[in-house]
């Protein structure tokens, strides 16, 4: 059996930290995982780091990779070696990591990117495996707006995940959050493209949570990263994933961890991304009124509506700007928080 620990630190007298934990047990998980990508995956051995985190909690990650330097998902779906790896065996997960800039180029090329990932996911699912998108992080380029570029990348991978019904591992958003809270913790190497050990460790924490439906809190970290720094990265991964399980298409994990548990016909927003309006699908057995609250990224309530009948739950968002929003849906039986992208 394995455990995870949610830490609560507080001060008593002269900076004495006490650790309280909640003990939750799950069956051990041993996964066979294939990584498709480039140097963003093989630098600092991302698969090895994920395995180190997993083994520190009684799990394991048997992994293989196809990660030629500089390759993109738009090109890899043509490569016989990549397809041979995908079809080599039924993997539990196949991680798809694109080139850092391929999701932010011209609209026509972006369409090609979407076609390419759809073809790759088709190959993966035909082989009995599950695709997971590695949402990449923006380059550290002083000539570009980092947050703007990261939003474009995030939207592209979220769209790809929703289009192909695949899990999304929101690495780029975890980097964005870490850089906002602790800019002193350097995630990019001097080239502005590749990750430092800290950057790879944060990425590994996000993937561990995404793949194992488990918190990285209190688990392994590299010796070069202090316990305090590791706790920062672990908390970001924990919060980002578990606050929005359905948004990352982690439906099975949501059914296990949310209280009360969601059924297979759980609440969904569609279309997502939305431009003028979105509708809500809720469990048919829940006939109570539905309250919908929409919050901006800084936590402000920007819209709130109550619907006596669920089939009429349609929200007009023409008055809201483009961006990422949190949507809270509350019925008499459950409350679910998920994410909504608005694009104009």
Image: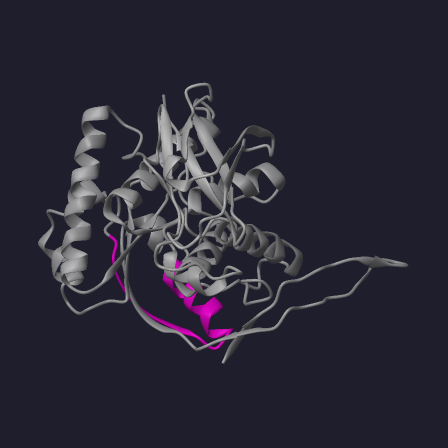
Q: Position of residue 163 (x, y in %)?
A: 25, 42
Q: Is residue 185 magenta?
A: no
Q: Quadrant of residue 101?
A: top left
Q: Position of residue 71 (x, y in %)?
A: 23, 44
Question: Can residue 188 be seen here?
Answer: no
Magenta residue span: 45-67
**Depth order, front residue of 87/20:** 20
Q: Quadrant of residue 235?
A: bottom right
Q: Quadrant of residue 263?
A: bottom left
Report the residue that reaches farthest toward the right: 13
Question: Can residue 265 be seen here?
Answer: yes
Q: Is residue 55 magenta?
A: yes
Q: Position of residue 291 (x, y in %)?
A: 52, 39
Identify the residue at image location x=47%, y=25%: 142
Identify the residue at image location x=46%, y=59%: 209
Asked if residue 339 is positioned above or below residue 205 in the image, the reply reads: above
Left/right of residue 199 with respect to residue 102 in the rendered view = right
Quadrant showing the C terminus: top left
Left/right of residue 188 with respect to residue 165 in the rendered view = right
**Depth order, front residue of 302/177:** 302
Identify the residue at image location x=49%, y=45%: 174
**Depth order, front residue of 64/223:** 64
Q: Position of residue 314 (x, y in %)?
A: 39, 32
């Amino acid at each position: 059996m394995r455990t995870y620990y949610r830490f609560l630190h507080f001060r008593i007298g002269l900076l004495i930290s006490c650790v309280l934990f909640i003990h939750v047990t799950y069956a051990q998980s041993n996964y066979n995982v294939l990584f498709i990508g480039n140097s963003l995956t093989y630098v600092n051995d991302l698969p090895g780091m994920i395995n180190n985190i997993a083994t520190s909690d009684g799990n394991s990650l048997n992994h293989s990779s196809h990660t030629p330097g500089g390759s993109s998902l738009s090109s890899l779906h043509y490569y016989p070696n990549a397809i041979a790896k995908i079809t080599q065996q039924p993997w539990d997960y196949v991680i798809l990591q694109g080139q850092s800039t391929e999701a932010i180029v011209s609209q026509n090329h972006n369409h090609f990117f979407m076609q390419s990932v759809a073809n790759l996911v088709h190959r993966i699912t035909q082989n009995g495996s599950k695709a997971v998108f590695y949402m990449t992080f923006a380059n550290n380029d002083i000539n570009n707006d980092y947050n703007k570029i990261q939003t474009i990348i995030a939207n592209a991978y979220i769209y790809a995940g929703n289009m192909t019904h695949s899990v999304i591992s929101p690495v780029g958003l975890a980097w964005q959050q870490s850089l906002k809270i602790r800019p002193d913790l350097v995630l990019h190497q001097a080239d502005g493209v590749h990750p430092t050990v800290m950057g790879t460790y944060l990425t590994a924490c996000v993937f561990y949570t995404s793949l194992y439906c488990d918190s990285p809190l209190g688990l392994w970290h590299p010796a070069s990263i202090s316990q305090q720094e590791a706790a920062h990265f672990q908390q970001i991964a924990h919060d980002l994933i578990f606050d929005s399980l359905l948004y990352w298409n982690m439906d099975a994990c949501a059914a296990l961890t949310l209280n009360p548990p969601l059924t297979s016909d759980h609440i969904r927003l569609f279309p997502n991304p939305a431009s003028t309006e979105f509708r809500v699908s809720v469990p048919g057995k829940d006939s109570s009124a539905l309250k919908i609250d929409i919050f901006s990224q800084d936590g402000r309530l920007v819209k709130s509506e109550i619907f006596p009948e669920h089939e009429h739950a349609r929200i007009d968002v023409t008055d809201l700007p483009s961006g990422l929003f949190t949507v809270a849906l509350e019925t008499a039986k459950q409350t679910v928080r998920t994410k909504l992208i608005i694009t104009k």
